Amino acid sequence: LLSTVPYFGPDMVEWLWGGFGVNETTLTRFFAFHFLFPFIIAALAAIHLMFLHQTGSNNPLGTNSNFDKVLFHKFFTEKDVLGVFFLLLCLMLLNCLNPWLLGDPENFNMANVMVTPTHI
């Protein structure tokens, strides 16, 4: 995808790959990126929450009294729990009413010990 960038594309691809093709260096870089990136995101989220806790959040409605505010824990937690239960109920109904709908059709083939499957 980087190779489509005009003039700098091939150089960017070669730099990212660590050579002229995908090799051990490329795999090491991508493994390190995929390992470290969640920790970086978690650190940025923690920093964001720290700054939000220090300064407070903006209120787009302009209400300053506690009477007009909606409590997060009571209302939004109940709303999220009800949503999760509803999705689990839908999944259980789907599983109970038609259990083979999401299965692989290959599972219904009779096994033949004399023939090796093509994917092996």
Image: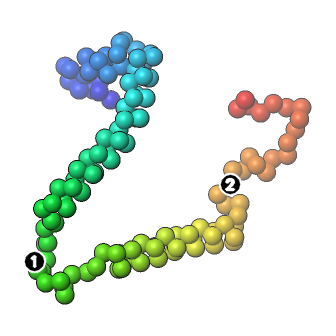
Find residue 103 and name its label: 2
State the residue at coordinates (30%, 75%).
72
Q: Is residue 11 left or right of residue 111?
A: left
The one nearer the camera, 79 or 10, is 79
State the residue at coordinates (12%, 80%).
63
Find residue 22 and name its label: none
- Of helix, strand and loop, which one carries label 1? loop
The one nearer the camera, 77 or 60, is 77
Neighbourhood count class around disc 2 (C-alpha, 10 Å): few under 14, some 14–19, many 20 upward: few
Question: Which callout, 2 or 1, points to the residue nearer the camera?
Answer: 1
Q: CA distance from mark 2 to mark 1?
A: 52 Å
The one nearer the camera, 109 or 33, is 33
Percent of width and height locating residue 17: 36, 19
Percent of width and height locating residue 114: 89, 31
Q: Is residue 43 left or right of residue 111?
A: left
- Please, what is the three-letter code of the amino acid marked with disc 1? Gly
Q: Is residue 45 left or right of residue 53?
A: right
State the residue at coordinates (52%, 70%).
87
Percent of width and height locating residue 85: 52, 73
Image height check: is 40 above or below 103? above
Neighbourhood count class around disc 1 (C-alpha, 10 Å): few under 14, some 14–19, many 20 upward: few
Q: Which residue is mark 1?
A: 62
